[in-house]
Image: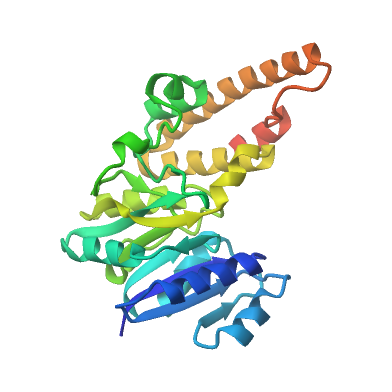
Amino acid sequence: MFDVSIIVVNWNTRQLLRDCIDSILRHSEGYSVEIVVVDNHSSDGSVEMVREQYPQVLLIANEENTGFARANNQGVRAASGRYVLLLNSDAMLTPGALRSLMELAASNPRIGMVGAQLIYPDGSFQASFTRIPTLRQEFLILSGLGRLLYGRTYPSFGPEESAGPQPAGYVEGACMLAPRSAYLGVGGLDEGYFMYAEDVDLCFAMHRGGWQVWYQPEARIIHLGSASSKNRKPQREADLYRSRVRFFRKNYGNSSAAALKALIFAFTVVKMAAHRVLRLVSGGRLGRPVVGMRQLYTTLKGA
């Protein structure tokens, strides 16, 4: 049995995957590590690269894109480590990060999940642990009041609140360490989520199962993915709304999900109106695209 199995889900990120695997090989000293790559039917040569350059990696090559949640669950079921570390393909370990995660996880038998401090390649802070979603929180996010009242990282905690290991509502899914038995015991990632909110749901399941979720700032993980979220497209926004409604229905019931749908609809209508005004007064130069009415209706109807 390995000390830890590191699960990396990949879809057309060949070079990033290579960097991720190299970082694991460089910075996993002191532990027996199994690397499991689950490829979701990439077309960029990722599978061939892993087979040729990393024969020690356990490779699962899917015939279709099964989504993030299902692919991670595949990797965990195939793994043989006492712990499993879910690591995004656009993330890289830094020296001592794995040790910091493992030591915190082993310090208390009730810890079921440990998340790391994500950083950008230049070393700057990335929000890495967050409050469990509530309707009040969703109102503050959608209205923009959360950032005005509590800072730009809301609902996540900012740098000043991120000093020292501490319990968390949920930790970001780019890097999550769990005892394999705890992960499987709560059912793993819910495969009903194709994208977004599956990490929140998993941490919520850990809490309900009597496990603790912790944040470990001493484990620093370089993460590229969040840098692209500044240019979030309408489809991504629609996918996020769908996942959030699913989370509320599953964990809080139909009435909470209906209330969230109403909030999303109301504030999206306001954003659409603001977008049109900005486009009009700026001659089309200003205004961020938002989900259209038809797309919003389809998204919320199917959520």
Q: Please tell me which residue lies in front, 250 or 131.
A: 131
* Residue positioned 35% across, 62% down in the render: 97
Residue 302 visible, this orientation: no
- Residue 68 location in percent, x, y? 54, 60
* Residue positioned 34% across, 39% down in the render: 132
Query: Above or below — where is 268 with respect to 27?
Result: above
Q: Residue furthest right?
A: 283
Query: Above or below — where is 126 with respect to 259?
Result: below
- Residue 25 location in percent, x, y? 45, 77
* Residue positioned 33% across, 48% down in the render: 204
Q: Is residue 52 left or right of residue 220?
A: right
Query: Above or below — where is 52 with respect to 156?
Result: below
Q: Please tell me which residue lies in front, 204 or 98.
A: 98
Residue 17 visible, this orientation: yes
Q: Please tell me which residue lies in front, 111 or 77.
A: 111
- Residue 233 location in percent, x, y? 68, 39
Pick the quarter of the image with the N terminus: bottom left
